[in-house]
Image (spheres, grey):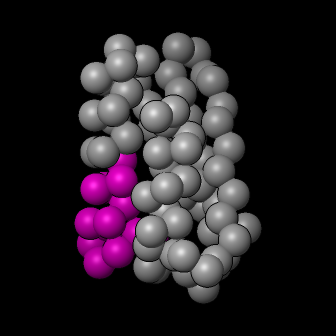
Amino acid sequence: MELVSLTEYLVKQILPEVEVKINKIDSEGDTVIQVLVPNECMSVVIGKGGNIANSIRTIVQAAAYNKKLGRVRINIDSL
């Protein structure tokens, strides 16, 4: 499963009825995945103390490591 589609799947499981945009940016050997959600849904995706966001990052980074795709960063921003 590609990293962008994996990230989109994870975010859509948290916010099933909300429009989410996900962009992939290649930057100096790193891959940056930008997750854009509505401002009112930011707290749901980030979670208390950043637990949900860190879990998403961990899963995507583990998938990237497993496929030897290098370092992946995930940025969560509002639309």
Q: Percent x, y for residue 66?
A: 28, 23
Residue sitting at x 46%, y 34%: 1
Classify residue 9 as left or right of residue 49: right
Residue 49 coordinates in the image, percent (x, y): 27, 72
Q: Is residue 18 above or below residue 31?
A: below
The image position of residue 3, as x and y in percent, is 49, 36
Residue under the point 35% across and 75% down: 47
The stretch drawn in magenta includes residue 47? yes
Q: Is residue 60 above or below residue 9?
A: above
In magenta stretch: residue 78 = no
Q: Residue 75: in sight, yes or no? A: no
Question: Residue 63: image x %, image y %?
Answer: 33, 32
Predominant secondary structure, magenta span: helix
In the picture, measured across the screen, residue 56 lies left or right of residue 16, that is left
So how many labels did they put on this image?
Answer: 0
Figure check: 69 above or below 48 = above
Q: What's the magenta region?
A: 45-57
Residue visible at 28% across and 45% down? 58
Question: Image check: 33 left or right of 62?
Answer: right
The vertical placement of 47 against 73, above or below, is below
Residue nearer the viewer, 56 or 49 = 56
Would residue 32 be seen by someone viewing this image from the given angle? yes
| On-image quarter of the C terminus | bottom right
Residue 44 placement: quadrant: bottom left
Identify which residue, 16 or 46, lies in the foreground: 16
Q: Is residue 39 left or right of residue 5?
A: right
User: Dividing the picture into quarters, in which one does residue 48 lie?
Assistant: bottom left
Question: In which quadrant of the rendered view does residue 78 lie?
Answer: bottom right
